[in-house]
Image (cartoon, rainbow, N blue to C red):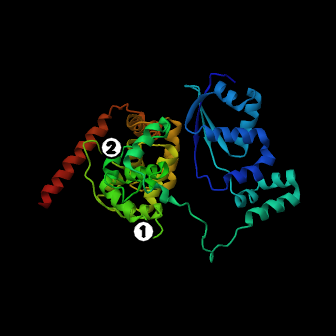
Amino acid sequence: MELEQNYMIYKTGDFQEKWNAYISLLYKPLIENDACMLYDLFLSLDQTNITLEKLLMLYGSYANRFDASKKKLENYELIKTYYDPISRKNIIEVYPPLNAESFLNHDTFSRLFLNQCGSSHFDFVKLHFNDEVDKTNYVDISEKMDLSCLESWTQEKEETYLNLKPEEGKLKYDFDFETFLKGADRIFPMRYRTKENLSRIASLASIHGIDAVDMRKYVQRSINPNTHVFDFEKLKKQVYANQKIIKPTDDPYKMSPVKFLQNKQKGAPVANADRKVIEKLIKNYSFSNEVMNVLIEYCLNQTQQKFSKAYVEKVAASWIRLQVDSKEKALEVCRQENQVKKPAPKLPDWYQNTEQSVPDDDLVQQALSLQRQLGKEKNDEI
């Protein structure tokens, strides 16, 4: 293994709430501690370009131990490794573990687990993950934090706080926060302006094409006046209901992805399922709006205008492996795909034989005589 080898690491798929428990209780007895440590390291390095030398330093071990652990993760489908022999670069895709039900019903994994841990531990794990508490008739009576202490928080204090905050903590989005927050102290008080809330609001606006004025209106409607709780799901419902048509600019690829797809549909509303696919891809693959729009256009052209979730995700994953991170690269990939020619149908040997034989004189005379006779008969009929 060459220490200069380059690895690009990406996390893909939906990680469920209990994914860490699945790793600890189901996978760890089979792949052992070293592989679990490497899996955690890969997750920590999501969307990172790194050399093997740096990886080994972070892993704290030698190349042969790293390689053995990586192969275990590949065997149990927790990662996939791709290699480009031309650029000599590697891509590692990190996948979530199977949930308990899928793992214990897996033809191979479940048998290996039983063989390694025994029937007693197998039953323990099965019961542990099946022990779901029914909370249908229960009401959450947990004490909520009293945020009244922030009622006196002012814009001046907020600016001071942002200046003191570490640089990496500041939010940077293509969203008009100045208009959104102007005069919104009562509509959207300071205590709601957490990094997470502002990030999710800006992301929704960017993907669905919501301007700052409309977004402020939707946010205000999403705060319960009695409990003072900001309901993000309620905000999403209002954003999804926005069917305002936006005319394409000089560069339509700069539009928000949802509005771009809506224009492709001649202004027809975008289905919620399609919106969720777009949100998921942008979240998982960090696609810019421009790259996402080229992807949408390409998939529609390839599938007779069908926006198939499985096909779109497949193309998106391939673009990650191709390092498509700009509109120009995306358009170039599409151009190359369209230039792939279909194999010409194989023709029989006689089709290529263009050699002409010289006609026999007797045959020529017979043909001319037959033509004169047919012409005479036709004139007699007239």
Answer with the quarter of the image where residue 208 lies.
bottom left
Q: Where's residue 356, x and y in %?
A: 35, 32
Answer with the quarter of the image where residue 307 lies.
bottom left
**Three-letter code, disc 1:** Pro
| 5, above or below 342, in the image | above
| 166, above or below 136, in the image | above
Q: How many marks can you see?
A: 2
SS for callout 2: helix
Q: Where's residue 195, x and y in %?
A: 48, 48
In the displayed orientation, state which residue is furthest to the left.
382
SS for callout 1: loop
Q: Does residue 235 appear left or right of residue 68 in this picture?
A: left
Task: Kindly identify which numbered label has been placed on residue 28.
Answer: none
Task: Kindly identify which numbered label has been placed on residue 254.
Answer: 2
Q: Nearer the viewer, residue 366 or 246?
A: 246
Residue at 76% over, 28% down? 64
Q: Nearer the viewer, mark 2 or mark 1?
A: 1
Residue at mark 1: 225
Q: Nearer the viewer, residue 68 or 340?
A: 68
Answer with the quarter of the image where residue 9 lies.
top right
Task: Note whether residue 176 is visible.
Answer: no
Q: Does residue 210 appear left or right of residue 250 in this picture?
A: right
Disc on the earlier residue, 2 or 1: 1
Residue at 79% over, 55% down? 110
Q: Where's residue 114, x and y in %?
A: 84, 55
Q: Residues within 10 Å of mark 1 (few under 14, many from 20)?
A: few
**Three-letter code, disc 2:** Lys
Which image quadrant: the C terminus? Answer: bottom left
Q: Where's residue 333, x and y in %?
A: 43, 37
| 106, above or below 283, in the image | below
